[in-house]
Amino acid sequence: MTDQGEIQIESSPVFLFKLGQFENTHSVLSQMSTSTTLSPETIQTAIQQYFAATRSENKVENMVACFAPDSISYDPADGPALEGHERLRQFFQGIAGLFARVELHEEFTSINGNEAAVKWTGRGIGHNGREVTFAGIDLFEFNPDGKIRSMRAYWQPATMVAELQGVH
């Protein structure tokens, strides 16, 4: 309110947008509505492809192919960011190289929009013949093409390696 008792109407773009008077309202709303929400079936298929890749002969390349080229992964979640296919490839090769055989099995999936949480169990046999079982939860975000845009993996790789080496 001004000193003359008049009401001052805010003219910021946000306020005007809220009133629907912003001249670019239509284009802003159009841009907002173009973000694609994938169907739960598409996301479920992408998750199945990723976990099937962990069980395949060519697991490293098949796993990398599930990710968008500009993806970012935190594996484990408190580790450094792995950006892009090459960094993912190096990481997956390092993990797979610890084992004579290793695979992950999804146990429970919850899908919300373009995101999903997956509880999984891993089983492997080390080059020393030792068998290990380990578990985790992965949080995925998918791009409009159904590729993994980002992933955060909640698990304990140090515990798995210690078990693999027979250190308890």
Image (cartoon, rainbow, N blue to C red):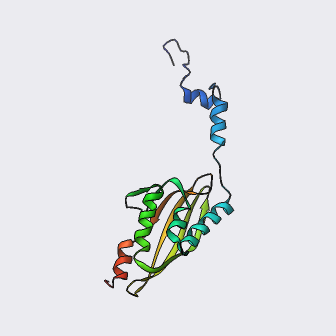
Q: Which residue does the image show at 62% across and 53% down from the upper left?
A: 145
Percent x, y of residue 143: 58, 53
Q: Total number of numbered labels?
A: 0
Residue positioned most to the bottom: 129
- Residue 113 quadrant: bottom right
Q: Is residue 160 above or below residue 131?
A: above
Q: Which residue does the image show at 48% across and 13% down from the upper left?
A: 3
Is residue 61 at least partly visible in the picture?
Answer: yes
- Residue 27 quadrant: top right
Q: Which residue does the image show at 65% across and 29% down from the upper left?
A: 20
Percent x, y of residue 127: 39, 83
Q: Nearer the viewer, residue 27 or 16?
A: 27
Q: Is residue 120 above or below residue 2?
A: below
Q: Is residue 33 above or below residue 139?
A: above
Percent x, y of residue 14: 55, 30
Q: Is residue 68 left or right of residue 97?
A: right
Residue positioned most to the top: 4
Please identify the quadrant where the C terminus is shown.
Answer: bottom left
Q: Nearer the viewer, residue 24 or 86?
A: 86
Q: Nearer the viewer, residue 53 or 111?
A: 53
Q: Is residue 126 left or right of residue 112?
A: left
Is residue 76 at least partly visible in the picture?
Answer: no
